[in-house]
Amino acid sequence: NAGVTQTPKFQVLKTGQSMTLQCAQDMNHNSMYWYRQDPGMGLRLIYYSASEGTTDKGEVPNGYNVSRLNKREFSLRLESAAPSQTSVYFCASSESTGGPYEQYFGPGTRLTVT
Amino acid sequence: GNSVTQMEGPVTLSEEAFLTINCTYTATGYPSLFWYVQYPGEGLQLLLKATKADDKGSNKGFEATYRKETTSFHLEKGSVQVSDSAVYFCALSDRSYIPTFGRGTSLIVHP
């Protein structure tokens, strides 16, 4: 099992450009999440999907959109990148029935917006 | 709402020293508690967990006990190694889909 995979690993964008971060999991998990990690800020939840067909805003959704393409895949889109979106982005998945709801993380995408 | 507070770092230790990283939480009900570890350049991975009061989670020489009376889940290791240098996150999960993470504590172990 590959677990949670993310592409790309690194990306540099210019202000105003758009891009989509891809995430896939092979653990048959219902729930998937997008976080950003910034120095001194810990992890902040951007969006999550409790199950296929549903998405909800997290703590810092502005400037982002998501798509739960199917049970395996959950993508994050930056429509018009800004320097404030320079960060490391992590996708995670978890089961949502039975508990405890431990999370499985991907390796991250390191994004720089100039 | 739920919250997790963990000690600020960095925590700097010499190899073979005893490690404690404090974690306290606020939650309604009976959440499950976790410690995750993040090595440089990697994503978080589960280190250990406990699902009810007085449970002790353990893995790779690390331990933490779920203390409901003090709402704490402190991480301990008797003898740290250079390879333990990483960032450690305390987290809780209740019946909602959204876990709550602490801000992370950086551990630096010198030879």
Image (cartoon, coloured by chain):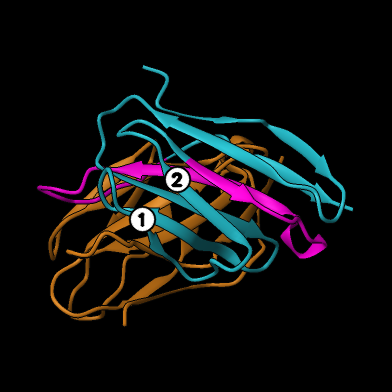
Chain colours: A cyan, B orange
Percent position (x, y) of residue A60? 55, 69
Asked whether A110 falls inside the magenta stretch, the response is no
Does the CB distance between marks 2 and 1 fall below 8 Å?
Answer: yes
The N terminus of chain A sits in image quarter: top left
From this view, report whether residue B82 is shown above or below residue B92. Answer: above
Per the rendered image, the range of residues in magenta is A75-104
As drawn, is B23 to the left or to the right of B41? Answer: left
Query: Chain letter of disc 1?
Result: A
* Residue matched to label 1: A55
Residue, x 82% and y 61% (percent of image)?
A83
Residue, x 71% and y 54% (percent of image)?
A87
Query: Mark 2 Cα within 10 Å, few/some/many (few <14, many 20+)?
Result: some
Residue, x 42% and y 19% (percent of image)?
A2
Tell me where residue B46 sits by quadrant: top left
Percent position (x, y) of residue B27? 25, 78
Mark 2 vs mark 1, CA separation in Å: 8 Å
From this view, report whether residue B89 is shown above or below residue A111. Answer: below
Tell me where residue B25 sits by quadrant: bottom left
Percent position (x, y) of residue B108? 67, 51
* Residue matched to label 2: A67
The kind of secondary structure element at disc 2 is strand
* Residue B78 visible in the picture: no
Percent position (x, y) of residue B3? 37, 77
Please name the amino acid that badge 2 sits on. Answer: Ser
Query: Chain letter of disc 2?
Result: A
Query: Mark 1 Cα within 10 Å, few/some/many (few <14, many 20+)?
Result: some
Which label belongs to residue A15? none
* Residue B62 visible in the picture: yes
In front: A65, or B110? A65
